[in-house]
Amino acid sequence: AAPDQTGLSPEGGPAACSQPGTDTRFLCHGRPTRIPPIVLVKTHKTGSSTAAQIVNRLGDRRNKRFMSPPDGSRMLGWPGPFPADLEERATFDIISSHCVYNRSLMRRYMGASPFFVPLLREP
């Protein structure tokens, strides 16, 4: 049976974190831990697309609101500045698109105390 938002199956036991029939070592025990709003600052050639997929799956499973590029692309203003003209009152839980880091603008769109995750590499 499918787990509910608490991470427990309808029977009250731990819900599988992976697909049914897979390794049972990866079971969720109890309620999932609350996650803060996340800003993943993607950088080209750093494995950031893989990291974004992980963050996006987490957000999907927890029904989080994503800030997406308004034009449907994968870039939030990149290579230009982070967009400042989006809905002022919108609050998002996750930013995981390519963008130029701008802490003050990003915080305007996020909930309280976002967790910034920069991915860097040595040139």
Image (cartoon, helix red, strand yellow):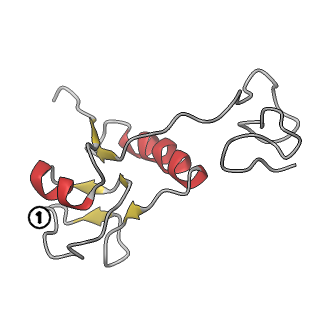
What residue sits 69% from the left and 30% below the top? Answer: 30
Give how far across and how far down residue 42 sits, in percent: 29, 46
| Residue found at the very far top of the displayed protein | 25
Give how far across and how far down residue 92 sits, in percent: 35, 60
| Circle 1 residue | 80
What residue sits 49% from the left and 47% below the top? Answer: 53
The total number of labels drawn is: 1
Horizontal placement of 74 versus 12: left or right?
Answer: left
| Residue found at the very far front of the displayed protein | 12
The amino acid pointed to by label 1 is: Gly
Give how far across and how far down residue 87 sits, in percent: 24, 76
Q: Quadrant of residue 18?
A: top right
What residue sits 81% from the left and 26% below the top? Answer: 23
Assign the C terminus to one quadrant of the image: top left
As helix, strand or loop, the secondary structure at mark 1 comes to loop
Give how far across and how far down residue 96 sits, in percent: 36, 52
Q: Which of 34 and 68 is in front in this view?
A: 34
What residue sits 13% from the left and 58% below the top? Answer: 105
Q: Is residue 20 above or below residue 73?
A: above
Q: Which of 120 and 12 is in front in this view?
A: 12
Horizontal placement of 27 versus 10: left or right?
Answer: left
The 10 Å Cα crowd at callout 1, few under 14, some 14 to 19, many 20 or more, is few
Q: Is residue 89 above or below residue 1?
A: below
Horizontal placement of 69 versus 107: left or right?
Answer: right
Q: Quadrant of residue 82?
A: bottom left
